[in-house]
Amino acid sequence: MAKIILVAHGDLAVSFRDTAAMIAGAETAEQISCLCMTQEKDPEQFEEEARALLMEDPEADYLIFADLFGASPCNTCISVFRSASYRMVTGMNLGVILDVMFQKDTLPLEELYESAKQTAKEGIRGVYLHT
């Protein structure tokens, strides 16, 4: 069972988790960890929080969702989790988080990762209704 971590600027990660709780239930959402890079937090403090989260269970599998590829939260987690068993999906969205929450207990990390990437791609749609 992979541990799920949401990583984002501001309180976005917590907002995604809270919204997932509305749909999937509080017990399911409680299994999601959040790392928030806020204005009050310097990069070193954010890195310390990421290391502390990893140290809670360094042997676990981690599936990390980041808001933006190449941004500080993403890059910090790549660095911190480099020696761990992890995969990361950037451009997180609610649909993929929910999908993963319902599959994380039944799929190994690599399959969960591949499913998350596919769900994320399928969740982006262009919609235009001409009137």
Image (cartoon, helix red, strand yellow):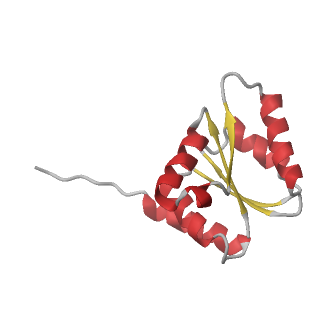
* Residue 114 percent location from the top left of the image: 62, 70
Drawn side of residue 131 relative to residue 27, left or right: left
Q: At x 83% / y 52%, what residue is drawn?
A: 81
* Residue 12 percent location from the top left of the image: 56, 39
* Residue 86 percent location from the top left of the image: 77, 60
Drawn side of residue 80 relative to residue 5, left or right: right
Given the current orientation, which residue lies at the most extreme left position? Answer: 131
- Residue 28 sits above or below residue 43 on the image: below
Task: Tell me where residue 106 sits by quadrant.
Answer: bottom right
Drawn side of residue 21 relative to residue 111, left or right: left
Given the current orientation, which residue lies at the most extreme bottom position? Answer: 106
Q: Could one spot residue 111 in this view of the protein?
A: yes
Q: How many marks?
A: 0
Task: Tell me where residue 88 sits by quadrant.
Answer: bottom right
Q: At x 66% / y 23%, what residue is drawn?
A: 39
Q: At x 57% / y 49%, what residue is drawn?
A: 17
Q: Could one spot residue 120 in this view of the protein?
A: no
Task: Tell me where residue 51 sits by quadrant.
Answer: top right
- Residue 8 sits above or below residue 103 on the image: above
Q: Looking at the image, which is closer to me, 72 or 101? A: 101
Assign the N terminus to one quadrant of the image.
bottom right
* Residue 37 percent location from the top left of the image: 68, 33
